[in-house]
Image (spheres, rainbow, N blue to C red):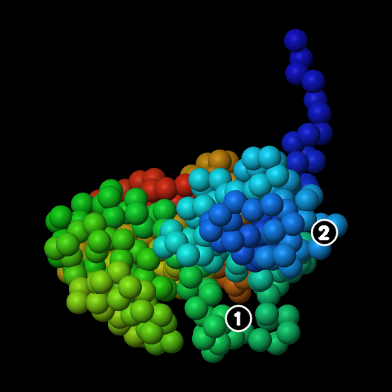
Amino acid sequence: MEQELTPDRIMQLGLGFWGSKTLLSAVELGLFTELAKAPRTAPGLEEALGLHPRSARDFLDALVALGMLEREGDRYSNTPQTDLFLDRGKPSYIGGLLEMANARLYPFWSCLTEALKTGQPQNEVNTGEEPFAVLYSDPERLRGFLSAMTGISMGAANALAEQFPWGDYRTFIDVGCAQGCMPVQVALAHPHLEGGGFDLPAVGPVFEEYVASHGLGDRLRFHPGDFFKDSLPRADVLVMGHILHDWNLDEKRQLIRKAYEALPEGGALIVYEALIDDERRHNAFGLLMSLNMLIETPGGFDYTGADCQGWMREAGFRDMYVEPLAGPDSMVVGKK
């Protein structure tokens, strides 16, 4: 029998922003952090979060229907997932990424059609500002951005700490380290390793605070610099996580060459991103991330594992391989 055609999938995707913005607003309001203290009724949450009585019940029940909350009688509580990942009081909090999505990406994505027609970014540049300059000049916004990078990197960092043969190496540096999520997770899992992170000087205090909170200040050090202007720190392993997609093709090749020059013989470069599958059919997140780079950067784009291996080969790397990490992320490894 022929399968009946329905518009359900089209409508679900086309109106997907309804559910997305409902979750983003819940994170912005601190709903999951409030419910981590104890289950609450709708009137209790109205008072705690400043919700209007007209909105509260539909808002909370929509989150139940979306699988983000549980309800027993008239009391709402977190699901196990939202309690672990969306309570600001827990080190497993990934809501920083969602906070950034709510504050920046959500309004910018309304200009996607313009970006598709012009090939130009659709963020702060439209008001004459340079996004990274604005971000790095405001300590509060910078801290929020770095926290967001921890949120998007935590799963891959844990998988990387487990899957890569760290026992063969002694030192490592995360290039573009942000808050320090990846170095911390690797160092916690492998006590023999020493290393740190390389990023713009403004990142240093945030990195050092995050590292110290995990008791790793004696093993992980911050290296200030600009990876386009300065040489990369020397180490047995260099890591570039969610970094290359920010830049155009020539800049990607330049960074990979600089990594090759900084590594010793036998050293390794690890690149991890939401790699697009080689057939460009399946990793929708990676493809949508590339559209995000269209909106956010002058020339950035995401790429396939085969693309990255080709750029590594051009720089002199050998024995490259691609390996899945967590969620949409995979790593490309090349040896010198």
Which residue is label 2 attached to?
53
Please say whether residue 219 is visible from this viewpoint: yes
> Is 239 located above or below residue 217 in the figure?
above
Q: Mark 1, residues whose alpha carbon is within 10 Å: few (<14), some, or many (≥20)?
A: few
How many numbered badges does the structure rendering display? 2
| Image quadrant where one finds the C terminus | bottom left
Horizontal placement of 330 versus 22: left or right?
left
Give the residue at x 76% y 63%. 51
Mark 1 against mark 2, which lies toward the viewer?
2
Which residue is label 1 attached to?
131
| Label located before the other in sequence (1 or 2) | 2
Labels 1 & 2 near each other (Cβ < 8 A): no
| Image quadrant where one finds the N terminus | top right
Which element carries disc 1, helix, strand or loop?
helix
Q: CA distance from mark 1 to mark 2?
A: 38 Å
Q: Tag 1: residue type? A: Pro
